Amino acid sequence: IAAVSLISFTRFPLLMWEKVLSKVKKSVVFMDDKCAEALHWSGGAATLLEAGARNLKQFSSFEACGVNEPKAVFVVSTLLKGRTVDIIKDIISLSHFQYCVVFTTVAHSVHLLVNKVTTEMEGSPVFEQFEEKLCEWMGNMNYTAEVMHVPVVFAPVSQQLIVAPPFAHLFPLLSPDLEAINEKRPEKRRFASLNDIDMHCLPAELQIEVKSLASALNSMFEATGTREESFALGPMSRIIAGELANLPQAKNRRKTAPNKASIIFVDRTMDLTGAVGHHGDNLVEKVLTMLKLLPGHVTDVQVDMLELTSLHKTPHSKNILAPGCLAQIQSSARSLWDAMLTSKHKEGVIEVRRQLVEAASKENLPIKMSMGRVTPEQLCSYIQLFRSSRGALESHCGVLQLGLATAQTLRHPSLPRWDSCLAFERLLLQALGDADFPAVLRQLLPLMKPRGVEDTSASGSRLREDELGPDELILLLVYLYSLADETQPADHDTEEEEELEKLERDLIGALTLVISREKELSPLLQKLTGCTNPEELTAERVHSAVEKMFKTLRGLSSTRNHLKQLRSIYTASDGIHQATYRPFLRQILEEVFHPDRRECPDIEHMSGGLTDLLKTGFSMFMKVSRPHPGDNPLLLLFMVGGVTPSELRLIKETVATHRPGTQVLVLSTRLLRPTDIPELLFGTQRLVPDIGV
C-alpha cells in the first residue's frame, strides 16, 4: 500500500489543479498570490496557457478585461466575503464578461459556519447565492456563473515535502497571545497555560483558518483513500488534529478508506533553536537566505539569468530579464533539486557540478573537466557554454537555473555572515553549560553596535562582510532564549531576576540604537517596525518594537515545559564531549521507530473522540492497546509553522537508520529560512490572521 500512497499524495495537488484547468479554456484567469504560489510548484502558469487560458492576471481591483474577452476564471484562497467579493465585483464591473467561474479553496461547510449556520444543508446555498450575484454584476441574469470549492492549497516542493502557501503565516501561539486571550475572559475563567486553550476560545479568524486547514487535509486523505491516526505535540497541533478528528466528513471517510497512515502534528515552537540556527550545513538553506524572494512568494527566490544571455550587466539589465527560480518541471532538474534539498552543502555543490558537466557532454559542448573544490567561477564557465545553442538551453534550462542559483549564493557578499552566525551559536551553546543565562546573554552586548562604525582606522567605514547586522543579532537572541530554560536551575532567585531585567534593558537600548542607524531596512526590520524606509523610523517606534520583541522572547524558553519526556533539546558538555543541540524532530522519530514500541506520553493520540472514551472505560476489563504512530506503513509529519531544509535531511537520515522500509512524507505550512522565524514571532498577527474578509 505504502508506495502507492506516497506518490498519490504528491500527485494530489496536480489532481486538484486539473479541476481548475478543465474550466480555463478561452478565459482570462485572475488569481491571488497564495494560489499562484501553489500553482508555481505544480507546473506554473504554463499549464494554464496549455489548457487554453488566454491570459493570467493578478487578483486586484486595478485589473479588468476588454470587450473581446467574455470569460473569466477567478481562483482565490479566501472566503467569498468582504474584500474578496469587493475585488471580484470591481473586476466584473470594469469588464464585459458573459461567463464567470469562481474557485475558492475554502470549503462550503466553512462558509456556512461564517454565516452562523450550524445545521447540515443540502447542496451549496452560499455558492448558489453568489452565482446570482455574479450574474447581477455581469448585467444579465441569463449569463453563466459557476462557484465551487477546490482545495488548491498544497504545493509539492519535492518528493519528500508538501507545503501549504495559503497557511504560510499560521504559527503556534506564544505567551503574549495567551495574555491577549485571557484579557477578554473573566478572572476566574482565565487559562493558566497555552495547553489549556481549545478551539472555541480562539478568535473567529483563527478558527476559520484552522477549520480550512483541517478541511484541506481531509480532501487530501479522501483523494488518496487514507484512514489516518492523528497524533499531536504542542497546543496548536492539538487543536488542528482535534478539528480533523471531529470533522463529520472525516468520520465517514475513516470508516471505509483502505490505506492506513499515521500523521503527527508538531508545533514549530517546540524547537526554535533548529529553525533559527545556522548549523544545518545545507546548500538550499543558504540559497533561500541569500537570494531575494520572488515577488508575492514565500518559498521561491529570484535567480539572475544574465549569464545565459549576451547582455551586458547594467542597472537596467535586471528589468529586461525575467528571473529564474527553483521550482522546475524537467525531471533532471527535479532530481537535482531533491538532492540539493536533502544533502550536505558540499555534496549538494558537487552534485550541481556533476549534473552541469553531464548536460554539457550530452550536448557535445567543449567542457574542461576539473576536480577539486567547486567554485562559483567554475560553475558559471560551464553554464556559459550553453549560451551558444538554443536547443541545449531549452533542454537543460532547469538544471542551468539551479546551477546559477548555486553560483550566485556561493559568491554572495552576505555569505560570510552565515559562518559568523554559526561560530557565535557554537560559542553560546558551550557557554550555556558553563555559566548562568544572564552571563551568556551578556556576551551579546559587545556585538550590539551599529554597523560599519568601529573599523575606521583600517579600511574606512566599509562594512565588514561577516559583520553581524540587526537581523543576525535578533536570530542569536531567539537562539539563546529558546534554550534558556534548559540550562537554568529551576529556582531563580529574585537577585538573578533583577540582574536579567537590567541586562534586558541594556540589550533593548543597544539594539534600538543598532536598528535606528541602519541605512536600509531589511524585510524583517520593515515588518518589526512597520516602516518601509529609514526616514520614517523614530527612536520611540524602534524602542517599542524591540520592547515588545523581548516580551515574546521571554516566553520562548517555556514552550516544552508541559512535556514529560521530550523536554530537552540540549545536552551539556561532560568534560569530554562538547555541549550539543539535539533536534526535536530526531527525538520524535527515534521514539516512533523504537524497536520496543514504547509508549511516549508526549505524542498524544487525537483520533476517535467518543469511541476512544468508551474503549478506555472498557479497558478495565480487557486489554486495549492504544494506536502507536509507528504502526502504519506511511508516516506523515505535519510541521505547524514551517520546516527547514536541514530538518528534511535529518528526517531522511533518521528514517534510513532506524526503519528503512517506512515511507515518510513531510507536510508543512512553509519551508523556512532562519529569518522567517523572527518575522513569525514578532511581526505576524498570529491570533487574527488575514482571511480576506
Image: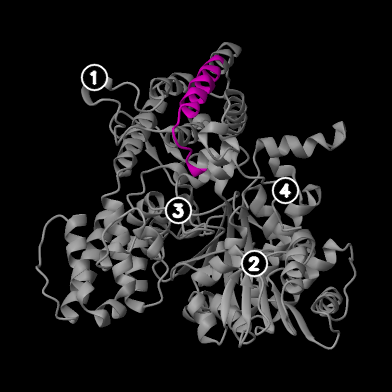
Gap in Å between the C-alphas at discs 1 and 4? 50 Å
Q: Which mark is first along the chain, 4 or 1?
A: 1
Q: Is residue 265 left or right of residue 338?
A: right
Q: Which residue is mark 2?
A: 59
Would you place residue 629 above or below residue 176 in this image?
A: below
User: Mark 3 and 2 residues: CB-CB less than 8 Å, in contact?
Assistant: no
User: Mark 1 and 2 residues: CB-CB less than 8 Å, in contact?
Assistant: no
Can residue 72 be seen in this snapshot? Answer: yes
Q: Residue at x 79, y 79 (%)?
A: 138
Quick one: SS at disc 1?
Answer: helix
Q: Which residue is mark 1?
A: 457
* Closer to the eye: label 3 or 4: 4
Can residue 246 be seen in this snapshot? Answer: no
* Closer to the eye: label 1 or 3: 1
Given the image, on which type of amino acid does mark 3 rest?
A: Thr
Q: Residue at x 50, y 70 (%)?
A: 40
Given the image, on which type of amino acid does mark 1 rest?
A: Ser
Q: Which mark is first along the chain, 2 or 3?
A: 2
Q: Residues within 10 Å of mark 3 (few under 14, many from 20)?
A: many
- Where is residue 674? Give x, y as percent: 45, 45
User: Mark 1 and 3 residues: CB-CB less than 8 Å, in contact?
Assistant: no
* Closer to the eye: label 3 or 2: 2
Quick one: SS at disc 4?
Answer: loop
Q: Which residue is mark 3?
A: 644
Residue 92: image quadrant is bottom right
- Where is residue 263? Give x, y as percent: 58, 64
